[in-house]
Image (cartoon, grey):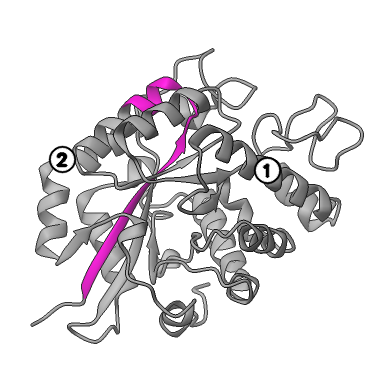
């Protein structure tokens, strides 16, 4: 029986975080296992990463960062709601808590996003192919509206909607990871409106929350794509994005965004993702499933957000 035709963008996040992570990402790109990267412009290796992107013609977007390290813009401790007294962003959960408490000044978010978009232009000499959010900050309430308006003002059309089907059934995820993933999914649903009103586009399907780190395997990537495509008419063409965090693990003190590399980047799980992405097993499975890898700029234009809403905005799993 004919399957839906799928064009898959494989995006490696955290480009520019450290030279070792970047080395692995470039290897994966040259092997055809990664098709796009998202650059942290406040990353310790942002300049060398930009040079690698130019040299190898890697499709590169901005990984907007409001949660880790030092800001790019003029924000200062004591004067910015985005920063700790030490001058760093508030952290993955700290930023979320501040947003929920309405302690974050959204004009300061816009100012920092503008600074990061400007820095990207300086490093690459062009606008990003897409903009997504480090640790999914771009879909948080309030932030998503400011984010969408900034992208619209800079003529950036593509973003990421981290809305993955069936997360509640992914029993291999530890409880904290599943809770975080489901919270991201909830935020992403609410971000559809602001994103659509600003003319942003995203792929029809997204996977990666259930396949991060040790949980990545050819079987689980294939299964996540299958869940995402349930109910799609046979022969129908769809686009999808696989979010990945591959690379050689960071070795302190090198790397990070101003505070040194975190445990996530130093973990063996980064190497595990790199190996899974590059192994023939995954490539063979994707080919068997009728999946063709591509970059964002290869995707055919679609009406903004319509396919995503039709397919994915059913009630979330508990």
Judged left or right of residue 287, residue 135 is right
Residue at 53 percent across and 72 percent down: it is 318
Q: Secondary structure at mark 2?
A: loop
Q: Which residues are magenta?
A: 5-23
- Crowd class of label 2 (few under 14; some 14 to 19; many from 20; radius 10 Å): some
Q: Secondary structure at mark 1?
A: loop
- Residue at the farthest right position: 78
Q: Position of residue 156 (x, y in %)?
A: 54, 58
Quarter-of-image position of residue 92: top right
Residue at 72 percent across and 60 percent down: it is 146
- Crowd class of label 1 (few under 14; some 14 to 19; many from 20; radius 10 Å): many
Q: Where 278 sits versus 229, above or below?
A: above
**Magenta-drawn stretch contains 136:** no
| Image quarter hosting the N terminus | bottom left
Q: Position of residue 158 (x, y in %)?
A: 48, 61
Q: Which mark is residue 66?
A: 1
Q: Which mark is residue 93?
A: none
Q: Position of residue 161 (x, y in %)?
A: 50, 64
Quarter-of-image position of residue 48: top left
Q: Which residue is mark 2?
A: 279
């Amino acid at each position: 029986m004919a399957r839906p035709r799928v064009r898959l963008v494989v995006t490696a996040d955290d480009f520019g975080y450290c030279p070792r992570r970047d080395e692995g990402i470039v290897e994966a790109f040259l092997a055809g296992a990664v098709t796009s990267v998202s650059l942290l412009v406040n990353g310790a290796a942002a300049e060398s990463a930009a040079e690698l992107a130019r040299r190898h013609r890697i499709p590169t977007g901005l990984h907007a960062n409001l949660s880790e390290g030092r800001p790019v813009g003029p924000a200062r401790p004591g004067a910015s709601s985005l920063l700790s007294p030490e001058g760093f962003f508030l952290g993955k959960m700290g930023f979320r808590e501040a947003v929920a408490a309405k302690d974050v000044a959204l004009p300061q978010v816009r100012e920092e996003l503008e600074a990061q978009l400007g820095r990207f232009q300086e490093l690459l000499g062009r606008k990003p192919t897409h903009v997504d959010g480090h640790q999914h900050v771009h879909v948080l309430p309030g932030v998503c509206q400011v984010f969408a308006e900034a992208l619209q003002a800079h003529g950036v059309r593509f973003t990421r909607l981290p809305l993955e089907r069936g997360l509640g059934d992914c029993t291999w995820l530890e409880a904290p990871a599943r809770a975080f993933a489901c919270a991201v999914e909830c935020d992403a649903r609410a971000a559809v409106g602001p994103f659509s009103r600003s003319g942003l586009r995203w792929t029809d399907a997204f996977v990666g929350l259930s396949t991060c780190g040790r949980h990545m395997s050819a079987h689980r990537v294939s299964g996540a794509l299958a869940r995402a495509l349930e109910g799609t008419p046979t022969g129908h063409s769809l686009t999808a994005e696989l979010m990945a965090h591959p690379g050689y693990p960071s070795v302190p003190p090198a790397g990070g965004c101003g505070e040194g590399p975190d445990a996530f980047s130093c973990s063996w799980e980064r190497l595990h993702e790199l190996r899974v992405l590059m192994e023939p097993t995954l490539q063979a499975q994707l080919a068997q499933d009728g999946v063709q890898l591509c970059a964002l700029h290869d995707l055919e234009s679609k009406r903004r957000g319509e396919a995503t809403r039709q397919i994915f905005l059913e009630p979330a799993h508990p």
